[in-house]
Image (cartoon, grey):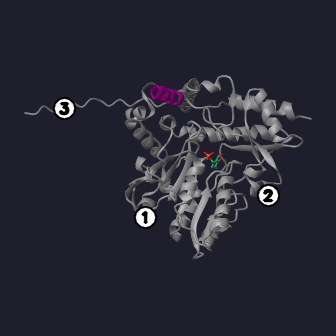
Amino acid sequence: MAIPKRRGKRVRPARRSAPAKAAAESAAADTALERWRADTPGCQDRIHLNNAGAALPPRSVVEVMHRHLDREAEIGGYEAADEAASRVQEAYEAVGKIVNSRGRNIAIVENATVAIAQALSAFDFKPGDVLVTTRCDYPSNQLMYLSLAQRTGLVIKRAADMAEGGVDPASVGKLTRDPRCRLVVMTWVPTNSGLVQDVGAVGAVCEEAGIPFVVDACQAIGQLPVDVHAVRCDYLAGTARKFLRGPRGIGFLYVSDRALAAGAYPLYVDMRGADWETANEFQLARGARRFENWEYAYALVLGMGEAARYALAVGDVAFTRSRELAADLREKLETLPQVRIFDRGADRCAIVTIAVDGHEPEELKHRLRARGINTSVSDRVSGVIDFEAKGITGALRLSPHYYNTAAELGAAVTVIDELTRG
Ligand SMILES: Cc1ncc(COP(=O)(O)O)c(C=O)c1O
């Protein structure tokens, strides 16, 4: 006979009061912040507000690269690559997770610019074809569009902005109804301001119109949640060194299953991207690998993989915290009458751009650096159209990340005030 189980009395966990809950959450946040800072040797002696340029990497990123370089020196570069094969594959998977895709959809290339160039080169533009883009696209991308226009007769059309800033998806929609429209390319977060363009709305417009969509997510990766399926893009470019906190000189291109199945490949496909099968025929690699080059920097690939793993472990708090810190920074800067803030758009991210009358941004950057505070400068050519509309020729760019502290922001604002007051 089965013995009936005795039901114990369920003890409900005591409900925490709201202040106790808030205190526990804040203690956990403090612990996480301490851990991130302990993992980041660079933040001990400097206030690094140049994460949109190149973030400080966590120690583990530097370690995996050192270890691989040591192995290259000890056993040989090709042999070390063989030894690291499974870790290299894991790097692809980790980078894939950052954009909610699989490793097979990731091509690892030198940087975001190369990623965009590879994607653009997959299209055979004919004279009169139209490429639609935005007024805030990254300068190197704008140069590529202009170069393509000169070489192929492609027509570049820039969609209109909304009153508050950022591309108007309805304007993109109108331009994509042109039967000659072949492609939409858009920079999610421009290099020269805190604007976040509505990439999801533009992706929906492109999907409805059946037009391929290329996204430059260089400043978004590591700073905003990125989901290539939500964005509905065919290609998405990223780089390791910015908000992802990876090394310099390495980036990636996400290539959708749709583009792969359509047989897309870059103009200058090489022996990594394809097999030379007979004298006049080649066979493309199956996945996004067809957009890569044969020779690449294994140590950097492993470093980017580790940065992706670290970012995944930190989680979404990186996005909320960097944005909150930037909002706090803007608030603090607004108290300085000599400072003007230039970030537009309904949605503003962890890039803060300012100008101070009578002070060149470059000079300010160097004087801040001498005081242990890293910032950067966006000059006129980083955003000709945007800066012309704002009536400035450049801006000082401050870009906090989740491992910065409110105290660091306060200290930076105090020094800016000291350097520019009166
Ligand atoms: C928005 C944006 N796109 C693309 C790039 C180019 O990235 P990379 O230097 O890795 O080619 C940058 C670099 O600052 C950028 O800010």
Image marks 3 and 2: residues in contact by CB distance under 8 Å: no
Residue 262 is tagged as: 1
Disc 3 residue crowd, few under 14, some 14–19, many 20+, Cα 10 Å: few
Q: Name the magenta segment's main secondary structure.
A: helix
- Name the amino acid type tagged 1: Ala
User: First in sequence: mark 2 or mark 1?
Assistant: 1
CA gap between label 3 and label 2 equals 75 Å
Ligand 1 contact, mark 2 (Cβ < 8 Å): no
| Residue at horizontal 56 percent and vertical 60 percent from the top | 120
Residue 246 is tagged as: none
Q: Can residue 61 be found in the magenta stretch?
A: yes
Query: Which stretch did the figure color magenta?
Result: 60-73
Image marks 1 and 3: residues in contact by CB distance under 8 Å: no
Residue topped by disc 3: 5
Instruction: Name the image quarter holding residue 88.
Output: top left
In front of the other: 307 or 153: 153
CA gap between label 1 and label 3 equals 61 Å
Q: Where is 125 relative to 116, above or below?
A: below
Check disc 3 and report its element: helix, strand or loop. Answer: loop
- Name the amino acid type tagged 2: Ala
The residue lying furthest to the right in this view is: 422
Instruction: Name the image quarter holding residue 84.
Output: top left
Q: Could you say where residue 378 lies in the image, as x and y percent from the top left?
A: 74, 45
CA gap between label 2 and label 1 equals 40 Å
Q: Can residue 393 be found in the magenta stretch?
A: no
Residue topped by disc 2: 389
Nearest to the eye among marks 1 and 3: give it.
Answer: 1
Quarter of the image with the N terminus in it: top left
Nearest to the eye among marks 3 and 2: give it.
Answer: 2
Q: Could you say where residue 17 lies in the image, as x and y percent from the top left?
A: 52, 31
